[in-house]
């Protein structure tokens, strides 16, 4: 695909809102994110209720959590949020090649975050912090793992959209898909900020 499969100036400034279908897709996705917020809120509540139920002889959050590793993962994910903003800006300026490049960087950063999280989980299990070790460990893995699954889905989704743009170009059909994927990515970044604060920082302070 050439970077200018669409004639310059043919696409409106916000192509994701150019059609009724595109606008409806964005609106429906806002509603979906509302449901996701409730779901994550429930998991946060469960974690807060159970986070001190560690059990005798099991590692506590103060002993387990390695803040430098988690801070690195946080930095990577927040940077990916920024690159996804650049991708949407490029889309609005009809710069298809730049948009694709920023989306690729976003995917690479998302994969890097997942790699660190898998390493982190492996380390915790090695330290005797398995899924069924305690109420604390079960609620921890459920919340953080559920978020990790969302990141994995986002990486896959954006990867497929990159392939679709290569194949079909940027138009009023592909633009809303990229826009809602960007919304989704921001959402999981915001959720991670809460996880970093509530799970890791509060857990380290005790």
Image (cartoon, rainbow, N blue to C red):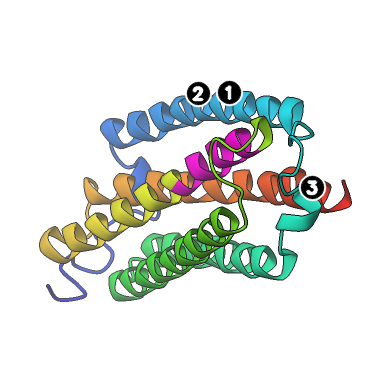
Q: Nearer the viewer, mark 3 or mark 2?
A: 3
Badge 1: few (under 14), some or many (20 or more) residues near its Cα, within 10 Å?
few
Badge 3: few (under 14), some or many (20 or more) residues near its Cα, within 10 Å?
some
Badge 2: few (under 14), some or many (20 or more) residues near its Cα, within 10 Å?
few
**Residue on which disc 1 sits:** 38
State the SS at label 1.
helix
Of residues 23 and 79, the one drawn nearer to the viewer in this rendering:
79
Determine the residue positioned at 39% across, 27% down.
28
Mark 1–mark 3 distance (CA, rounded to whole Å): 23 Å
State the SS at label 2.
helix
Mark 1–mark 2 distance (CA, rounded to whole Å): 5 Å
Asked whether the residues under the numbered discs 1 and 2 touch, taking CB atoms below 8 Å apart as contact, a structural biologist would say yes
Measured from the top left, where is residue 142 in percent x and y? Answer: 54, 36
Is residue 14 something that shows in the picture?
A: no
Measured from the top left, where is residue 56 in percent x and y? Answer: 76, 37
What span is colored magenta in the figure? 137-148
Of residues 52 and 164, the one drawn nearer to the viewer in this rendering:
52
Q: Indicate whether 70 appears above or below 101.
A: above
Give the number of the disc on residue 52: none
Which residue occupies the extreme right position in the image? 205
Determine the residue positioned at 54% across, 60% down.
81
**Residue on which disc 3 sits:** 203
Lateral position of residue 65 relative to residue 24, left or right: right
**Residue on which disc 2 sits:** 35
């Amino acid at each position: 695909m050439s970077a200018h499969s669409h004639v310059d100036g043919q696409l409106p400034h916000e192509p994701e809102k150019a059609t009724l279908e595109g606008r409806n897709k964005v609106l429906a996705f806002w509603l979906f994110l509302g449901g996701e917020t409730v779901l994550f809120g429930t998991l946060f509540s469960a974690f807060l209720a159970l986070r001190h139920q560690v059990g005798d002889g099991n590692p506590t959050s103060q002993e387990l959590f390695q803040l430098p590793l988690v801070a690195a993962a946080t930095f990577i994910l927040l940077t990916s949020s920024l690159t996804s903003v650049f991708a949407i800006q490029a889309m609005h300026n009809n710069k298809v090649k730049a948009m694709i490049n920023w989306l690729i960087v976003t995917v690479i950063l998302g994969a890097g975050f997942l790699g660190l999280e898998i390493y982190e989980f492996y380390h915790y299990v090695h330290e005797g912090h398995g899924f069924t070790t305690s109420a604390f460990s079960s609620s921890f893995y459920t919340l953080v793992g559920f978020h990790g699954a969302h990141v994995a889905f986002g990486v896959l989704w954006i990867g497929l959209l990159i392939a679709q743009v290569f194949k079909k170009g940027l138009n009023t059909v592909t633009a809303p898909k990229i826009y809602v994927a960007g919304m989704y990515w921001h959402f999981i970044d915001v959720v991670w900020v809460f996880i970093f604060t509530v799970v890791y920082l509060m857990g380290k302070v005790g």
